[in-house]
Image (cartoon, rainbow, N blue to C red):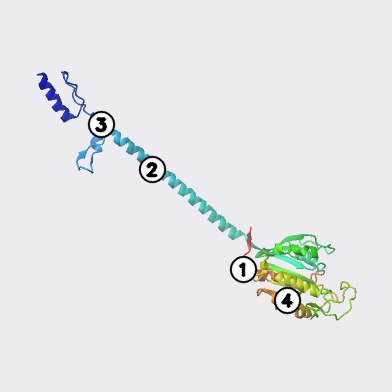
């Protein structure tokens, strides 16, 4: 009987795969049976094994890790979707801001006033401010030589013009090149009472000097030949600089045309400007013009600003403006 019990339990162990007491134990321990709830869970998650194609039941120990994995995956998806939503909101904000700035901003162009000392740059700058600033201040005609720079911004209907008045003394001309890269136009002023006869002649050394043709009568700075050759050399240095290339327009203003001892614009154009812009030192092709002005009376100032306004817009592809609200 004892052997028969052992044989029976061995056979039962193989069938039920449960714990069986050792030999000599007469108690029968039936295999554990799942509860009805556990039985429903296991049968609801029945699947087929891929290796042997036999039906098997998923226990709770297998379901819980899968649930954790699914919850983690959904959290990641939710976090990713939140990040994508935040990125979309940021893109929409920057797009709306760009459209708003485009609708409410205007182009800003920088113009530098160059020329020799005592050419009338600061007086011309004062006349521009008196004409185009909203307050229309009275121009300060009693000026002193500029040491450094004077800056102002005038508001035109379709743009802003930022005007830089730079000192023209010999010691300050080296600083001009720091303004070339950001300049959209150059205005070069000449003292038309200090140009001799307005014609350049070649000397024995191959250089140029002003042709003496009239005596100084108190307005020419004390030199019969004037400063025409110096103006030519300075203007050529400006034009051949690498930062002024790219078609930067140049406006030459023959100032002090209200004086009786001034040189006519035609002579200045033929004797100086044509030689400079058509010579070897002219650099690239650019828009240029010579206009008569009187910074003291304001004659020709508005026409000069209008010419600069039209030329910087035409050259905006080579020198793009700065957008300003």
* Disc 4 secondary structure class: helix
Q: Earlier in the sequence, mark 2 or mark 1?
A: 2
Rendered residue at 76%/60% (across/down): 149
Q: Residue furthest front?
A: 205
Q: Which residue is mark 4?
A: 276
Cα separation between marks 4 and 2? 75 Å
Q: Circle 1 is placed at which residue position?
A: 318
Which of disc 3 and disc 2 is earlier in sequence? Answer: 3
- 237 vs 65, left or right, is right
> Pointer 2: what residue?
74
SS under mark 1? loop
Disc nearer the start of the sequence (1/3): 3
Label 4 and label 3: CA atoms lie apart by 102 Å
User: Residue 85 got which mark?
Assistant: none
Q: Are marks 4 and 2 in contact (CB under 8 Å)?
A: no
Residue that label 3 marks: 38
Q: Position of residue 203 (x, y in %)?
A: 80, 80
Distance from the alpha carbon under mark 2 to that under mark 3: 27 Å
Residue 317: which quarter of the image?
bottom right
Left or right? Give the position of 31 relative to 208: left
């Amino acid at each position: 009987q004892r052997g028969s019990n052992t044989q029976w339990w061995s056979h039962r162990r193989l069938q039920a795969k449960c714990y069986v007491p050792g030999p000599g134990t007469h108690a029968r321990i039936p295999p554990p049976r799942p509860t009805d709830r556990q039985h429903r869970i296991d049968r609801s998650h029945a699947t087929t094994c891929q290796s042997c194609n036999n039906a098997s039941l998923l226990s709770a120990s297998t379901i819980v890790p899968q649930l954790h994995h699914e919850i983690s995956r959904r959290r990641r998806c939710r976090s990713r979707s939140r990040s994508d939503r935040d990125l979309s909101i940021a893109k929409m904000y920057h797009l709306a801001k760009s459209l708003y700035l485009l609708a409410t901003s205007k182009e800003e162009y920088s113009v530098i006033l160059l020329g020799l000392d005592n050419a009338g740059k600061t007086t011309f700058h004062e006349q521009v401010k008196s004409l185009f600033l909203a307050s229309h201040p009275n121009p300060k005609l009693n000026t002193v030589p500029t040491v450094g720079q004077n800056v102002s911004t005038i508001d035109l209907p379709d743009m802003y013009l930022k005007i830089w008045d730079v000192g023209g003394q010999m010691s300050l001309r080296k600083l001009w090149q720091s303004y070339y890269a950001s300049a959209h136009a150059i205005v070069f002023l000449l003292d038309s009472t200090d140009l001799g006869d307005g014609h350049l002649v070649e000397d024995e050394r191959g250089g140029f000097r002003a042709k003496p043709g009239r005596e100084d009568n108190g307005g020419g700075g004390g030199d019969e030949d004037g400063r025409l050759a110096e103006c030519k050399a300075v203007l050529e240095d400006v034009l051949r600089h690498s930062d002024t290339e790219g078609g930067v327009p140049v406006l030459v203003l023959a100032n002090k045309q209200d004086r009786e001892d001034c040189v006519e614009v035609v002579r200045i154009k033929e004797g100086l400007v044509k030689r400079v812009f058509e010579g070897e030192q002219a650099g690239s092709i650019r828009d240029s013009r010579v206009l008569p002005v009187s910074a003291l009376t304001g004659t020709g100032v508005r026409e000069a600003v209008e010419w600069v306004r039209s030329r910087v817009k035409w050259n905006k592809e080579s020198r793009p403006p700065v957008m300003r609200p």
